[in-house]
Amino acid sequence: MKKYKIAAIPGDGIGKEVVPAGQQALEAVAAAVGGYQFEFEVFGWGGDWYRQHGQMMPADGLQALKGADAILFGSAGDPDIPDHITLWGLRLKICQGFDQYANVRPTRILPGIDGPLKRCRAQDLDWVIVRENSEGEYAGVGGRAHQGHPIEVATDVSVMTRVGVERIIRYAFRLAQSRPRRQLTVVTKSNAQRHAMVMWDEVAQEVARDFPDVHWDKELVDAMTARMVNRPATIDTVVATNLHADILSDLAAALAGSLGIAPTGNIDPERRYPSMFEPIHGSAFDIMGKGLANPVGTFWSCVMLLDHLGEQASAQRLMRAIERVTQDTSLHTRDLGGTATTAAVTAALCRFVAEA
Ligand code: ATP
């Protein structure tokens, strides 16, 4: 029987609760559909690992992950460790080490979820945001000098390469082409940032010629926030820089009802390395260990993982089960105004997967 090796990295906080829930969901789907199995290897990296070893993951950690078919990630964040260490020491190390240059974030208002926009019907908000995930504002280029002195200087240099811009825009056009509306919005800030952002516009213009069946438009990032709130139905697929898409996708998650629902995939489209799937929320230390974490964002990330493995029937089955969970308000966790626990939601989901 076909066996998929999944590296599970729960990380910190509620990651330790939602990743095991995701593993249960994947096991349930494999049992229901048949024909393949999952083999999980769990890596205890993150804040606790840092306290013991002085680093978030071992120096040869990427080597250990390399043979996996996919990675299921929880979150990285710890109240006692600076955010830039937890982020760069684990999640970004994997994203950059495996050149997972496309960060894909689907957003929908799932059945039973009450979004905050008054006039937005569920069918008006069905987006995928594609975030450039390898360079730009998060390239890690910059430095500080004269620290603590009045003449201190600090820079974060945004790096945009033509190769990096073209590959993400091409990926987004291809994704837009595969969706029913075939529509792409390219987001930049090319009025104020007149070098790299203008290059984005030029590259988009060039790549668009290869996709005559995709309708596309351009939007400045500030105008895009207003459009997402005021005219959500005019949006389908979106591509933006690392920083811009980071912000837009948090807004998207909030507009779709809760941070606890939103999934993401860090994809290497060329499949040279394993891709990594994770809920977009962080470690949420305020609710950790209480059974309050909403596992739906992780379940939806598992749908993306299954899709990436080519197990489309399984992906659809799991998505149907997720929609049955969200539809039933007695299965809503506290972030959605309910009282259900992580364990109760997971048990119901696995039941629905078996029944579907
Ligand atoms: P980090 O620093 O790791 O990004 P954070 O706690 O600052 O973590 P998030 O975890 O992204 O930020 O979430 C902010 C708040 O949203 C949390 O404090 C928590 O109350 C709520 N929240 C996030 N994810 C979930 C979830 N899956 N289930 C329930 N509530 C959640």
Image: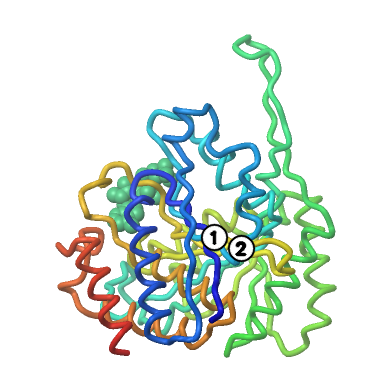
- Residue bearing mark 2: 275
The colour mode here is rainbow
Q: Which one is nearer the viewer's eye here, 150 or 210?
A: 210
At x 77% / y 64%, what residue is drawn? 201
**Image: 329 above or below 352:** above
**Image: 298 above or below 57:** below
Q: Earlier in the sequence, mark 1 or mark 2?
A: 1
Q: Quadrant of residue 317?
A: bottom left
User: How far apart are the alpha carbons under marks 1 and 2?
Assistant: 6 Å
Question: Regarding mark 2 in the picture, which secondary structure is present there?
Answer: strand
**Image: 55 above or below 211:** above
Q: Quadrant of residue 65?
A: bottom right
- Mark 2 burial class by Cα count in 10 Å: few <14, some 14-19, many 20+: many
Q: Position of residue 267 (x, y in %)?
A: 63, 64
Q: Position of residue 277 (x, y in %)?
A: 52, 62
How many circles with numbers are drawn on the protein? 2
Q: Position of residue 160 (x, y in %)?
A: 78, 51
* Amino acid tagged 1: Ile
- Residue bearing mark 1: 71
At x 58% / y 76%, what residue is drawn? 309
Q: Position of residue 6 (x, y in %)?
A: 52, 63
Left or right: where 124 falls relative to 203? left
* Amino acid tagged 2: Ser
Whether the residues at callouts 1 and 2 have beta carbons within 8 Å, the answer is yes
At x 46% / y 65%, what residue is drawn? 263
Q: Which one is nearer the viewer's eye here, 286 or 160?
A: 286
- Mark 1 burial class by Cα count in 10 Å: few <14, some 14-19, many 20+: many
Q: Which one is nearer the viewer's eye here, 279 or 244?
A: 279
